[in-house]
Image (spheres, rainbow, N blue to C red):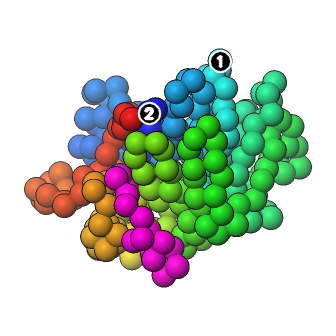
Amino acid sequence: MKFEFLGTADTGGIPLHQCRCIICEEARQKSIHNRSTSAYLELDDESVILFDAGDDLLMERFNTKRIRAVFLTHFHADHCLGLIRLRKSVDTIVCYTPNDTQGFGDLFVHKDSIDYKVLEPFESIEIEGVRIVAVPLLHSKLTHGYVVFTPKSVVAYLTDCASIPESSLDYLKSQTIDHLFLDAAYSPCFESKKHLNWQSAEEYIDSISPKKGYLIHASCKTILPLHTSGIVLKYPYIDKGFCIEG
């Protein structure tokens, strides 16, 4: 099995349109395009499970692959835009979501091949020997993180949150998590009721105590102060293409 990130950036991505900062200019020089945070799990039969669907190129990326399911964290555009094209699939694709009755755009009006199923907090789904548990997070929309139990490792995918509820924190602490990926969209000087910063994210990771912790959902404005000041974080921001095998 393989768990790989299709993107680890915020809504604007890196490089940001018309931004001339060092981070964006270096990304252009290296032809790096880091899009909104999303990932996929490739199973042993080469079918895939998607975690978020913010990239509208998902149709091309997985054009001949069986998509077993999509686990949507929430219905913001940068996490569900790819469903607009995936809903035209010949196959029925199950999409697990929080209990958000508004959704995004006309996704609920024209469902086409997408079969939406609501996951209650801490409900689990098993697919081909992989168990996935919905963990509530506090964001500006109803949001789930997901803990993924494969035969060889446990991965926590926790993107887009301003805080983690006590019940979710207790659950995460009770698990032996190998790899934890957590939203750290901002630097500590920026206050937000929607996202964590690298300092608050590091405190949560310390509290949960996974074997390895990583930061996601960054913008160029998040990474720039680290680049210019030489600050070294306890847990690294990861890039698109970051992969866990096994």
Q: In which quarter of the image is residue 176?
A: bottom left
Q: Residue 130: x and y, percent?
A: 56, 44
Which amino acid type is shown beneath numbered disc 1? Thr
Q: Which dot marks residue 64? A: 1
Q: Does the magenta stretch include residue 105?
A: no
Residue 85 in sight here: yes
Instruction: Residue 162 in the image: state x and y as whole percent.
Output: 47, 72
Give the answer, above or below, for where 172 lies relative to 48. Answer: below
Q: What stretch is highlighted in magenta?
A: 164-181
* Image: 59 above or below 5: above
Q: Can residue 139 be seen in this view?
A: no
Query: Rounded to the nearest whole Å, what is the CA distance between mark 1 and mark 2?
Result: 18 Å
Q: Which residue is drawn at 48% across and 72% down?
A: 171
What's the amino acid at mark 2? Lys
Instruction: Identify the residue position indicated by label 2 in the image.
Output: 2
Residue ID at (44%, 33%): 2
Q: Do the residues labelled 1 and 2 touch (CB within 8 Å)?
A: no
Comparing 170 with 183, the one in front is 170
